């Protein structure tokens, strides 16, 4: 199963200071060297983390690395996607006030709009994925819209399945997991590639990662960057002590 690393969270840290640190390209390089199969970035309309220039530089610096661009179904970002040619575009719902993507795309409700924008992106030679909840009606709509792939939203499963999270509930987690598996199976039967992501952690990824026949790619970001703080903090403090002398 492929791992796509969502590096928006590195850009969030950088944009908190409107600084150049941490260097997004250097971070992307570390991810690739460590074994990431792809890089995922969300070019939001409000540009709160990833900037247009980041996408340009990621594409040119890592031409052989699978680049997945998440975006809202809006023409202005679709035009950027068609110009920059990531390997894949994942269309996500986007609300200005949200902290992160909340819920999946309602493809059924916006079928016409999503069909038109998907066609435009596919005509530019880019694969189209739709980020949806694991609901049969959305899977069918994704196929009707002409998507190549779906990314199943694992957020609800993620909330219930991580023992450190407040909503931890193994029974509910199991139910959500089964819903994800049924949805993945149904999507596959309709000829769609199935990816998954959102909220996955070291503690809850295994049951999904075991389903190699159902899922092709997992997109994970926040928990990897959160872990990197602990894996790297000791070294970072030591280096600053040395720099001070
Ligand atoms: N997939 C999609 C479509 C997302 O919007 C996000 C979050 O930006 C992710 C995967 C990764 O989620 P997380 O950062 O919680 O691992």
Image (cartoon, rainbow, N blue to C red):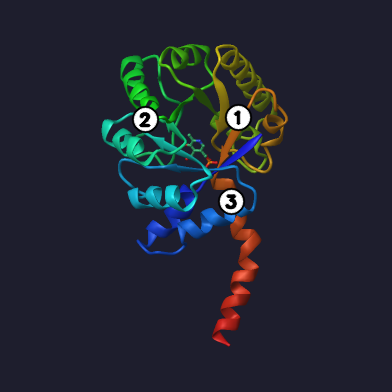
The quarter in which the C terminus is drawn is bottom right
Q: Which is in the foreground here, disc 1 or disc 2?
A: 2
Mark 1 residue element: helix
Disc 1 to disc 3, C-alpha distance:
27 Å
CA gap, disc 1 to disc 2? 34 Å
Residue 226's place in the image compared with 238, above or below, is above
Distance from the alpha carbon under mark 2 to that under mark 3 = 26 Å
Q: Earlier in the sequence, mark 1 or mark 2?
A: 2
- Residue reaching furthest bottom? 245
Q: Which residue is mark 3?
A: 32
On residue 124, the disc is 2
> Within 8 Å: ligand 1 and the Cβ of disc 2?
no
Reading the chain from its start, which is encountered first: label 2 or label 3? Answer: 3
Q: Check disc 2: other Cα within 10 Å, few if <14, some if 14-19, many if 20+.
A: some
Residue positioned 37% across, 62% down in the render: 17
Give the class, few, some or many, for how many residues have Cα within 10 Å of label 3's Cα (few <14, many ≥20). Answer: some
Visible in this render: residue 39? yes
Residue at (63%, 16%) from the top-left corner? 185
| Vertical relation: 91 (above or below) 14 | above
Q: Residues within 10 Å of mark 1 (few under 14, many from 20)?
A: many
Q: Is residue 185 left or right of residue 139?
A: right
Q: Where does label 1 land, which residue? A: 157
């Amino acid at each position: 199963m492929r791992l796509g690393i969502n590096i928006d969270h590195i850009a969030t840290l950088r944009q908190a200071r409107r600084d150049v640190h941490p260097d997004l390209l250097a971070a992307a390089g570390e991810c690739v060297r460590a074994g990431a199969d792809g890089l995922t970035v969300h070019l939001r309309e409000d540009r709160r983390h990833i900037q247009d220039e980041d996408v340009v530089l990621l594409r040119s610096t890592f031409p052989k690395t699978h680049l997945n661009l998440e975006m809202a179904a809006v023409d202005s970002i679709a035009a950027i996607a068609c110009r920059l040619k990531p390997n894949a575009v994942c269309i996500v719902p986007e609300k200005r006030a949200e902290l992160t993507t909340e819920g999946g795309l309602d493809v059924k409700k916006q079928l016409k709009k999503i069909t038109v924008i998907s066609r435009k992106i596919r005509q530019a030679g880019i694969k189209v994925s739709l980020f949806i909840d694991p609901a049969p009606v959305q899977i069918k709509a994704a196929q009707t819209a002409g998507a190549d792939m779906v990314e199943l939203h694992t957020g609800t499963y993620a909330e219930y399945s991580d023992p450190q999270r407040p909503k931890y509930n193994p029974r509910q987690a199991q139910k959500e997991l089964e819903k994800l598996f049924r949805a993945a199976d149904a999507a596959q039967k309709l000829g769609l590639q199935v990816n998954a992501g959102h909220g996955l952690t070291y503690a809850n990824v295994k049951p999904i990662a075991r389903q190699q026949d159902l899922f092709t790619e997992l997109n994970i970001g926040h928990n990897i960057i959160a872990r990197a703080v602990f894996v790297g903090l000791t070294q970072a403090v030591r280096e600053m002590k040395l720099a001070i002398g």
